[in-house]
Every structure is written in C-alpha cells, then in structure tokens.
Image (cartoon, rainbow, N blue to C red):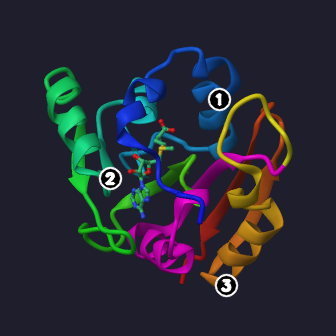
Amino acid sequence: MTERKFDPRHIHKLNDTKRLETLNPDYLWAFSGLKDPHVLVDVGAGTGFFAVAFAEKMNGGKIYACDTADEMIAWMQENITASYADQIIPVKSKEASIPLSDAIADLVSMINLHHELKAPEQILAEARRLLKPGAKIMIVDWKTEETPEGPPLKIRVAPGVIRGQLKKAGFVNIFESDGLPYHHILVGEKQAL
Ligand SMILES: C[S@@+](CC[C@H](N)C(=O)[O-])C[C@H]1O[C@@H](n2cnc3c(N)ncnc32)[C@H](O)[C@@H]1O
C-alpha cells in the first residue's frame, strides 16, 4: 500500500522557496477572499511555510499551525516561534481531531494535506466546528493529472470528490480554482445559522 504521509526526513523540501512559484501565497490569500482575519487554523502546517506567509499578510492576530507529526511541531518551535512569538502557535493535533475551541477561526486552511488524510470526513467536521459562522475553509491539493512533482497520482483526490465531502460536511457556496499550475483550490463557507 502506498504511504500517504509526508516523510519528515524530507522536511527541507517544504521550505524550498521554489514552491512559491507554483503555489503562490498571494494567489491563495486573494482567492480565499479573507478580509482582515484575526484567527487562522492551518491544518497539516508542516514547517509552517504557509503559516509564515499568511502571518505576513495579517494585522496581528493568531495562526494555529496544527500537525500530527512531532518532527513538524519541533521544527516550528525551534525555527518559527522566536520571530512570530505570539502570532504562530504550533499545535500537535491527532489524525481526526484538533485540540482547539469551537468557532474561533476566520479561515481553516489545508494545503497539500487532503491526499494524506485517513479520515477526511472527520477532519472536515473538525474544520467546521472550529470556524465562526460564515467563515471559510480553503483546501489546496495536487491536481489529479501528471505534474513534474507531487505525490503519486493514485492517492490524489479529485476536486469533485472534495466538493462532495465539503457539501456533506455542511459547507455552502463552494467555489473552485484551477488557476495554479499543479494545484486545485476549493473554498467553502460554514453556513451561518
Ligand atoms: C505534504 S505536508 C504539507 C505541509 C504544508 N501544508 C506545506 O504545504 O508546506 C503534509 C503535512 O500534513 C501533516 N498531516 C498529515 N495528516 C494530518 C492530519 N490528519 N492532521 C494534521 N496534520 C496532518 C503531515 O505530518 C505533514 O506535515
């Protein structure tokens, strides 16, 4: 069976600035449609590469950078927290649960994570729980076509499947972009009650 999880021995790959050419944080930020967010939750944050890029776009506030791997949490604690002391908070999460309170977030982001998830329905339910009413989830993952880099095609998840999972989890106003060369993006909204 193909291993889905990112191998922490390749941690340096996550910090390769060449990634910014194909996975431009400015594009992601604009596509999310965020307006002056205060709290972000980045699930599967890895080394916090995108948490840092997003922190630079916020006027203060907090980003909870969640990951299941001890190596990633340790890396963020050693390399990020000194410069972003009160802004980026590494959080050790579990495969299907995130130890944060309800309705705290303006955005939950999941970048290059979806193909690794063992329980996508449960993580989407967690994302929904963490979001404020009307707030958004943004899922960015590899296109289901050959790309010069990325995980094996057979474990990638088609945007139609992600859309179905989002709907089932109670997200509305789902819109999608394939404007990036190797990634698709889906953004959905937690319906305000
Ligand atoms: C391919 S890396 C992407 C990291 C980061 N988003 C980026 O693009 O730089 C995927 C990360 O998700 C983490 N991960 C896998 N399953 C997870 C889950 N259920 N909840 C939180 N993190 C998870 C892995 O440990 C790994 O650090």
Q: Nearer the viewer's eye, disc 3 or disc 1? A: 1
Q: Is mark 2 within 8 Å of ligand 1?
A: yes
Label 3 close to label 2 by CB (< 8 Å): no
Work out how far the residue at label 3 is from the one at label 2, CA to CA, in angstroms. Answer: 23 Å
List the residue tagged with mark 1: 23
Work out how far the residue at label 1 is from the one at label 2, CA to CA, in angstroms. Answer: 20 Å
Direction from residue 91 to residue 150 in the image, left or right: right
Direction from residue 51 to residue 69 in the image, left or right: left
Residue at horizontal 23%, vertical 53%? Answer: 91
List the residue tagged with mark 3: 168
**Amino acid residing under circle 2:** Cys
Q: Is residue 98 above or below residue 27?
A: below
Q: State the residue in front, 169 or 46.
A: 46
Q: From this viewpoint, which residue is outermost toward the front?
A: 1
Q: Looking at the rendering, in which quadrant would you find the N terminus?
A: bottom right
Q: State the residue in front, 122 or 176.
A: 122
Residue 190: x, y in percent?
Answer: 57, 71
SS for dot 3: helix
Q: Is mark 1 within 8 Å of ligand 1?
A: yes
Residue range of the region highlighted in magenta in the rendering: 115-144
Q: Which mark is residue 66?
A: 2
Q: Is residue 173 above or below residue 54?
A: below
Q: Is residue 35 visible?
A: yes
Quadrant for residue 84, please give it: top left
Residue 79: x, y in percent?
Answer: 21, 24
Q: State the residue in front, 114 or 148.
A: 148
Q: Is residue 41 magenta?
A: no
